[in-house]
Image: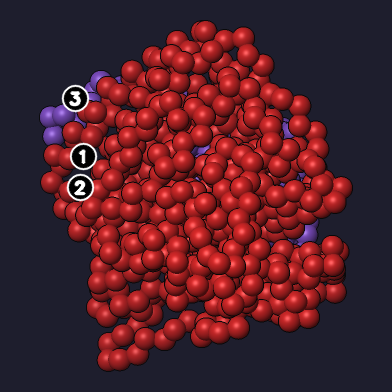
Amino acid sequence: MYQIIKQILKTGIKTETPPQPDEAMRVNAQRLQQQILDMFGRALTIRHVDAGSCNGCELEIHAVNNAYYNIEGLGIKFVASPRHADMLLVTGPVSRHMETALKRTYDATPEPKLVVAVGDCARDGGIFGESYASCGGVANVVPVDVAVPGCPPTPNAILQGILTAISAQK
Amino acid sequence: MPITHPNLQLIPLAGAIPAWTGSIHAQDLTAICQNVRDGGGRLVALWGSDQRSMQQGFALHTLLMNENGLICLNLPLDENHPTHPDIRHIFPAANRMQRAVYDLLGIYAHEGGDHRKWMRHGAWHGGSFPLRKDFDAAQSRCDELDAYSFVKVEGIGVHEIPVGPVHAGIIEPGHFRFSILGEKVLRLEERLGYTHKGTEKRFESMTLQQGAKLAGRVSGDTTVAYAWAYAMAAEGIPGITPPDRALWLRALFLERERVACHLGDLGYLGNDVALSFGFAQFWILKEQVLRNNSALFGHRYLMDRIIPGGVAADLSAEGKRVIEQELAMLEREVRILRGIYEEHAGVQDRFIGAGRVEPQLAAQLGLCGLAGRASSQAWDTRVQFPCVPYDKLDVQMATYRNGDVAARVIVRFDELFESLRLQREILVNLMHGDELALPLEKLPGNGFGIGMVEGWRGEVMVAIHTDAQGNLARVHPHDPSWQNWPVLEHAVLDNIVPDFPLINKSFNLSYSGHDL
């Protein structure tokens, strides 16, 4: 126990200032009403769905949870069920084999809900494109509010995408 | 010659890894496989190809490995009846590979019991095969739901827990069907293929350079190993060797990938046994490695830094100093954290004995890579077939024999420290002034090359076939997860359901690298 406490004290606080929202990422002009924003307040729950990614974007979504980006410190939490979620964070080109699962996850998420497509593949199919096995971007399967570019997007860009989705257009 | 058989003529393949190739007749396949198996060898990969445009029907490629190197057996198959002998009784790992070969190419094993589909769910019709050159995507499209006959376990008190494809954590999609009695797992059956996104077909419309980018996205967490294996396969076809400095930089990238992934896994393994301190600490260290990657090489995971012919990033003298400092910091911090993990009674109580794979079972099923080494399977490409620069680095293989979660944690720690040492050696020996890449625009026609690299998870293989014009006719990437997924089904037997996430994480297998 002594070692653990010593290590925690030595490490100190690593958390950095979060980025500002970026309107360039917004796909859907305004699905968001002020009352929805009020409802979400400063607590947001996210269900992540890998709809066919290479696992690259997942690495960065994990990183968003590390001490530097400390997403939970912003009141944002990843949850285990879409039924508990305000937002879906979707990665990958949507594989045909995940198409139904993604639609069902979307349907299981209560209104009001937001969808953030993470990464180049989720945005437009990326390097995998559309094919016999791939539906391409997430917007081809479920409505998308914000799309975050990058292969994979940096943790800051993902954070920015999430914050953009929950902030009203000025 | 790595093996001898009266009907087998082997030709050596040029390239960084010792490999031979030869054509065989159907009746000799099982005998040769048995011969390799009896000599302690293994099945690395199995794939098919459509060679009808060259009037050669189809072909089945079986890649074996023994202590001498790789042996690729090419079995030509009749265009109308592409069948081959079943080899799953010799190599159990061949089961899913054979089923995937059928789903994608219509080549099938003419014996054997398990003919369930594997890679195909309901996205294309059963009688159509995506990797055939005449595949018509629009005509073959299908919108069925996947129906898969899981093996049913019955008896008083037995019930099933279906999990996935959308999992409760931030992980890739797949389906696990548990049959349980009380809390104990009686049987686990995996259903994969959810992230099948047509990667292999995609290669066939790409140039060599575009293919390198795609290879780096077969499995995003293993981007360096795949990019290197792809480059190695490509460079073997014209028989070129990249500049020395490029090869040393590739090894630096590969070891940095290993360190980053092991740090991440060690953090999550702590988290899975409720020591969130471990997650916080290890992920701080991992983030520092990733930030250095970004600052020095331009990408946090080093994607697209290895290209056919060489590398696309260099290291400055200042960069060397940054890495040296980072290595010293990691050495110091990971030693402290290892001490904490080892002395923490709660952590060890969950680690020790969970998800055990005995060495004998590991050998029988072909468990490989990191998980294999934790069950006494002493295979490491960097040790057995060291290409430049590993031939000068004398890699110390980490092995352990307990085969449980604790053993896989120990192997990760040992490999992490060894990777730090290797990086230091590389920095010392990295020569200045060399060029970074040889020009490699296009491959020669009708070529075949193999690349194999020891990624952090295990051996990653890429095979490239070119057509008469030198275009990519068939590219097959193979992930060690193919071998290890079936072993996970055995590892969880008799464990309790709440230990599954921990056991699963201790293997940390790839879905995307398997589903392609």
Q: In the rendered structure, which amino acid carries the disc numbered 2?
A: Val
Q: Residue at x 50, y 72 (%)?
A: B31
Q: Which residue is mark 1?
A: B341
Viewer-nearest of labels 2 and 3?
2
Query: Could you say where residue B335 lies in the image, as x and y percent from the top left?
Result: 24, 28
Q: CA distance from mark 3 to mark 1?
A: 14 Å
Callout 1: helix, strand or loop?
helix
In contact (CB < 8 Å): disc 2 and disc 3: no
Q: Nearer the viewer, residue B159 or B312?
A: B312
Which of the chains bears the disc numbered 2?
B
Q: CA distance from mark 2 to mark 3?
A: 19 Å
Q: Which residue is mark 2?
A: B347
Q: Residue at x 19, y 35 (%)?
A: B340
In contact (CB < 8 Å): disc 1 and disc 2: yes
Reading the chain from its start, which is encountered first: label 1 or label 2? 1
Q: Are marks 3 and 1 on the same chain?
A: no
In contact (CB < 8 Å): disc 3 and disc 1: no
The residue carrying pointer 2 sits among few (fewer than 14), some (14 to 19) or many (20 or more) residues within 10 Å by Cα, namely many
The residue carrying pointer 3 sits among few (fewer than 14), some (14 to 19) or many (20 or more) residues within 10 Å by Cα, namely few
Q: Which residue is mark 3?
A: A6
Query: Could you say where residue A16 lies in the image, as x and y percent from the top left?
Result: 46, 24
Specify whether A99 is left or right of B225: right
Which of the chains bears the disc numbered 1?
B
Viewer-nearest of labels 3 and 1?
1
Q: Residue at x 62, y 59 (%)?
A: B9
